[in-house]
């Protein structure tokens, strides 16, 4: 996504918040997202009001962390940082004779126009020439608010305005953009293998007899857990490709591809998939599917996946070769379980089997490691009691 619209604040200035609290709801092209906080403290200032649509990275609020005094003077309402600022450290001394770097500027005829990065990005998106905007910031700097005001002035009359796309259309655009980027930038390789599920399905049937109806497992949970456990042996497949280099993630957060009732899909994370028991994983899985289809996912669930698993077996598909979701570096697909003839001890017998596939990023791994990974998934599924 490039921008989001704030729907509502759930907290007010002066409210205390803890890490993990939901403080706001934001509308995106795919769903309404619950925004979490990742620190404990008190909300000191709110910078964005409900109904405002701003670029990704815009600072929404200021939180004073516990143990730190209030600022002597409240910060100005500016949205200049594209990302949360890093911890401050003393700036290195400039070499003797070197001039200080100027703030970001845009050439505008004979003069240099000072404009914040976020404001410049929004002006480009709206097709507004920054040179025509009167800046109200320090030294005439053009701020985000200046661009927003200019957009209202330049906005076409209601009769001339193009109809806004509904969420389903915007979702298709978002999915198309992500997948086009994936196929353009990621050198995919594809592998497949057939996994004998007879032992796993027999174990599952017996296990479910011991459980209440509400607590029974579906075989998809076995597949997800097997993938997570295999990733411990192949950490290069559990990570991201960011700024030209691979970043292996220590946590295993499997993203689950979930189809939405109105069309489209999302792939939120089951956090710490490898460390959850099957009972916990089934509960988390049900909750995630329900909230995804109700449009109430948390922001971390959409940003944390380290690999994606997609299963189209219920739709009758025997094999799925997925497109990697950037910046991830791998995707695992599962088809439906079918009975197939198999030779065992000289006899032809029927076995329940499914096709598992891997879409891998050649910048991070290769077919040899990918093949070993699929073999590990198969081996783990032959001992379902160990999941």
Image: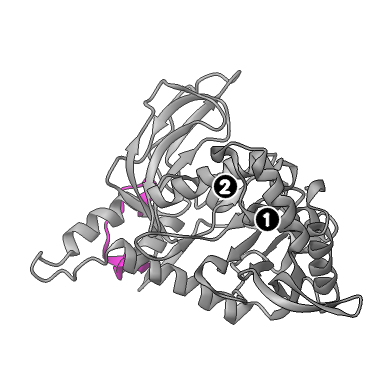
Tell me if residue 375 comes above or below residue 93 in the rendering. Answer: below
Q: What residue appears at the point 59 percent right and 67 percent down from the top-left corner?
A: 325
* x, y percent for residue 233: 85, 58
Give the structural element (helix, strand or loop) at label 2. helix
Q: What residue appears at the point 79 percent right and 78 percent down from the top-left corner?
A: 342
Q: Is residue 22 left or right of residue 318?
A: left
* x, y percent for residue 52: 30, 48
- In this view, the residue in front, 3 or 116, is 3
Q: Is residue 199 left or right of residue 136?
A: right
- In this view, the residue in front, 255 or 361, is 255
State the mark number for residue 224.
1
Count of numbered labels shown in the rendering: 2
Q: Are marks 2 and 1 in contact (CB under 8 Å)?
A: yes
* x, y percent for residue 333: 64, 69
Question: Which residue, given by chain and number where applicable, does mark 2 sit on?
Answer: 285
> Which span of residues is magenta-colored?
124-143
Q: Residues within 10 Å of mark 2 (few under 14, many from 20)?
A: some
**Residue at the limit of the structure toward the right, as seen here:** 345
Give the structural element (helix, strand or loop) at label 1. helix
Distance from the alpha carbon under mark 2 to that under mark 1: 10 Å
Residue 88 appears in the figure: no
State the mark number for residue 180.
none
Quarter of the image with the N terminus in it: bottom left
Please tell me in which quadrant of the rendered image residue 313 appears: bottom right
* x, y percent for residue 118: 43, 56
Please tell me in which quadrant of the rendered image residue 154 appears: bottom left
User: Colour scheme of this structure image?
Assistant: one colour
């Amino acid at each position: 996504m490039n921008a989001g619209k704030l729907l509502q604040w759930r907290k007010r200035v002066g409210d205390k918040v803890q890490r993990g609290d939901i403080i706001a709801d934001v509308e995106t092209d795919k769903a309404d997202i619950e925004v979490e906080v990742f620190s404990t403290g008190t909300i000191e200032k709110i910078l964005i009001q409900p109904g405002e649509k701003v670029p990704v990275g815009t600072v929404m609020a200021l939180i004073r962390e516990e143990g730190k005094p209030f600022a002597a003077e409240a910060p100005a309402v500016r949205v200049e940082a594209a990302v949360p600022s890093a911890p401050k450290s003393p700036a290195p001394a400039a070499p003797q004779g070197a001039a200080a770097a100027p703030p970001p500027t845009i050439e505008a005829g004979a003069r240099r126009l000072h404009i914040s990065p976020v404001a410049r990005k929004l002006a480009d998106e709206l097709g507004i020439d920054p040179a025509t905007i009167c800046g109200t910031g320090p030294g005439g700097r053009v701020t985000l608010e200046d661009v927003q005001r200019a957009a209202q002035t330049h906005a076409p009359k209601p009769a001339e305005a193009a109809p806004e796309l509904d969420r389903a259309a915007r979702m298709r655009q978002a999915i198309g953009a992500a997948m086009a980027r994936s196929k353009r930038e990621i050198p995919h390789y594809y592998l497949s293998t057939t996994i004998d599920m007879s032992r796993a399905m027999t174990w599952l049937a017996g296990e479910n007899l011991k459980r209440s109806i509400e607590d029974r497992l579906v075989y998809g949970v076995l597949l997800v857990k097997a993938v997570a456990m295999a990733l411990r042996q192949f950490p290069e497949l559990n990570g991201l490709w960011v700024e030209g280099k691979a970043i292996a993630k220590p946590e295993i957060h499997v993203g689950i591809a979930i189809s939405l009732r109105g069309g489209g899909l999302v792939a939120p994370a089951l956090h710490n998939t490898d460390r959850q028991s099957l009972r916990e994983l089934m509960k988390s899985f049900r909750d995630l599917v329900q909230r995804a289809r109700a449009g109430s996912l948390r922001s971390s669930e959409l940003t944390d996946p380290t690999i994606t698993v997609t299963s189209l077996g219920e739709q009758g598909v025997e094999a799925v070769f997925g497109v990697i979701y950037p910046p991830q570096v791998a995707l695992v697909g599962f088809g439906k379980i079918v009975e197939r003839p198999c030779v065992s001890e000289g006899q032809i017998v029927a076995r329940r089997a499914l096709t598992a596939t891997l879409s891998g990023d050649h910048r991070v791994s290769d077919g040899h490691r990918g093949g070993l990974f699929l073999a590990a998934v198969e081996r783990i599924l032959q001992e379902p009691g160990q999941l």
